[in-house]
Amino acid sequence: MEASRRSAVKPVIVLKPSKRVPLVEDTTGKASDALPLPLYLTNAVFFTLFFSVVYFLLSRWREKIRASIPLHAVTFPEIVAVFAFVASLIYLLGFFGIDFVQSLIIRPSGDVWSGEDDEEGNEVLLREEDARTVPCGQALDCSVPSLPHMVRNVTAQRLFDEKPVRVTTEEDARKVSCGQAVDFSLRSLPPRPPIVTSQKLFHEKTVIVTTEEDEEIIKSVVAGTLPSYSLESKLGDCKRAAAIRREALQRLTGRSLSGLPLDGFDYESILGQCCEMPVGYVQIPVGIAGPLLLNGREYSVPMATTEGCLVASTNRGCKAIHLSGGATSILLKDGMTRAPVVRFSTAKRAAELKFYLEDPENFDTLAVVFNRSSRFGRLQSIKCAIAGKNLYLRFTCSTGDAMGMNMVSKGVQNVLDFLQTDFPDMDVIGISGNFCSDKKPAAVNWIEGRGKSVVCEAIIEGDVVRKVLKTSVESLVELNMLKNLTGSAMAGALGGFNAHASNIVTAIYIATGQDPAQNVESSHCITMMEAVNDGKDLHISVTMPSVEVGTVGGGTQLASQSACLNLLGVKGASKEVAGANSRMLATIVAGAVLAGELSLMSALAAGQLVKSHMKYNRSSKDMSNLSS
């Protein structure tokens, strides 16, 4: 991680000042000093010259065409005009000024600091963990900490030099931060360099470089005159907006975000669909469990987690399944749900709508209205429940390879608009009335299912149970009955008749760009174990009625999550059969849960849980001396 951070540091530029002074005026001449006119007047002259000669040449050539004079027969004024055109064009290609041209032609001396001593110029902001000071080595005489607040008026030219000298050791970084052994090659600063944040140069301290324009925007956000959420639309640059929002947040809270990465993320990819007002991204390690032999194919299962032993345990379960011939996973049902709540003046009117919706003769009409919302969304059923004069309508539909929440919601809205004609007294209270039920444990999902309903099974050979899982078939069967079945019933569990299905579901969901909050109902699982083949082998199964996954939309299109889906062979929409990739992903989730359940239950039966966690889930590093 540190290597990637150091390599991301663009210019650490080195200077050799003749004296150790904070700032030295630049006595080096510029290319623009040789001009007889000020720079802005020179620009105006070349700008006028360019359009004048263009107009002159076009006029002359038009006259030649009218008079049938060959175009190659040029006069002396035309030759002068051509040379003037070329000269002015070259100048204008230098970005309307000599500053850009001089950076390519004239290189100032490298034994002085940068030259522009402008109080309104670019600022180098040095931030430390909440104290916001630049650390120098102990007992070193450093001039940087003596500067007021956290701003030092040093131009940012040495941070944007095209030939940077990289800091490779902490000692080198300390020398640079204290102004020792410094050697700069001065180059002209671009008109508006981008913000550079979270570059850890000096003892892991954040260096922030802003322009005067960015500084004004930050002050506006801090003052509350410019809403933070509008930065992307105002600036048209998502990364710059995130950097400005981040700096404004640090100033508002007085807390450093130096440990939260900013660079290396495509913020445009999340705009308007994944996350609002970003200030960075969180790094979660991704481990691989497998190969998982499922339905005759091997899968390497990506799991994003910070819990030690989880990937290792699931991997052991995959090994046991593989040695026993693999697992079989079957999709039972595929249908996402949405349940609006509507209200009538009487319970009778609510019952009339219930009878209308559940009448098979009306289903085809409602299906046509519903299916207009998407070419993949297809209405499957409508079930209603009454509470007084309130009616809850649970729509179920297929959604292709998308998880489908937005798709089914649009279809439901179409049906509600259609029903308003025949039931004008219907008052739509909410598009979701919790009878769906999304991101909450609910018996309706456990019984009726939501998303993909999957069952996965495997027969684990007795020898594998003893040699790989270090336990016995009898112990596993007994533990499963007393823990997963009886123990969960004693606790009044709802869909929680398992050891740790949520662990595997959530890890795969984060890795593949699913909605992590849907692990609530997606982790509904009942684990069954039974001795078979005269008690020699173990039959294990997991039944999961509401696995909610998709391979398109949401976080699945982000680069990292897309890579994990590609590893499983389910990236994007299926080109053969609509919904095939998302259904395959659901079966893989169930297969990984089966492996995780098998391994954890074996560890519990063998008394290995605490020992393994103390061995693999405890760091031996002394964290007391490490900075945050």
Image (cartoon, rainbow, N blue to C red):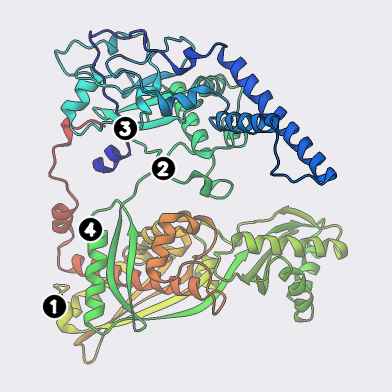
Question: If you read the primary sequence from the N terminus, does the residue marked by circle 2 or circle 4 appear first?
Answer: 2
Query: Which residue, given by chain and number where applicable, does mark 2 sit on?
Result: 281
Q: CA distance from mark 1 to mark 3?
A: 62 Å
The residue located at (30%, 74%) in the rendering is 292
Query: Which residue, given by chain and number where applicable, does mark 1 sit on?
Result: 466
The residue located at (27%, 70%) in the rendering is 290
Query: Which residue, given by chain and number where applicable, does mark 4 sit on?
Result: 309
Q: CA distance from mark 2 to mark 3?
A: 30 Å
Query: Where is residue 77 shown, x and y percent of the image?
Result: 70, 29
Residue closest to the eye, 73 or 475: 73
Query: Which residue, given by chain and number where applicable, does mark 3 sit on?
Result: 163
Q: Is residue 97 left or right of residue 506?
A: right
Question: If you read the primary sequence from the N terminus, does the residue marked by circle 1 or circle 3 appear first?
Answer: 3
Q: Element at badge 4?
A: loop
Q: Residue furthest bottom?
A: 534
Q: CA distance from mark 1 to mark 4?
A: 20 Å
Question: If you read the primary sequence from the N terminus, does the residue marked by circle 4 or circle 3 appear first?
Answer: 3
Q: CA distance from mark 4 to mark 3?
A: 46 Å
- Res 586 visible: yes
Q: Element at badge 1?
A: helix
**Mark sitting on residue 438:** none
Question: If you read the primary sequence from the N terminus, does the residue marked by circle 1 or circle 4 appear first?
Answer: 4
Look at label 2 and name its amino acid.
Tyr
Q: Nearer the viewer, mark 4 or mark 3?
A: 3
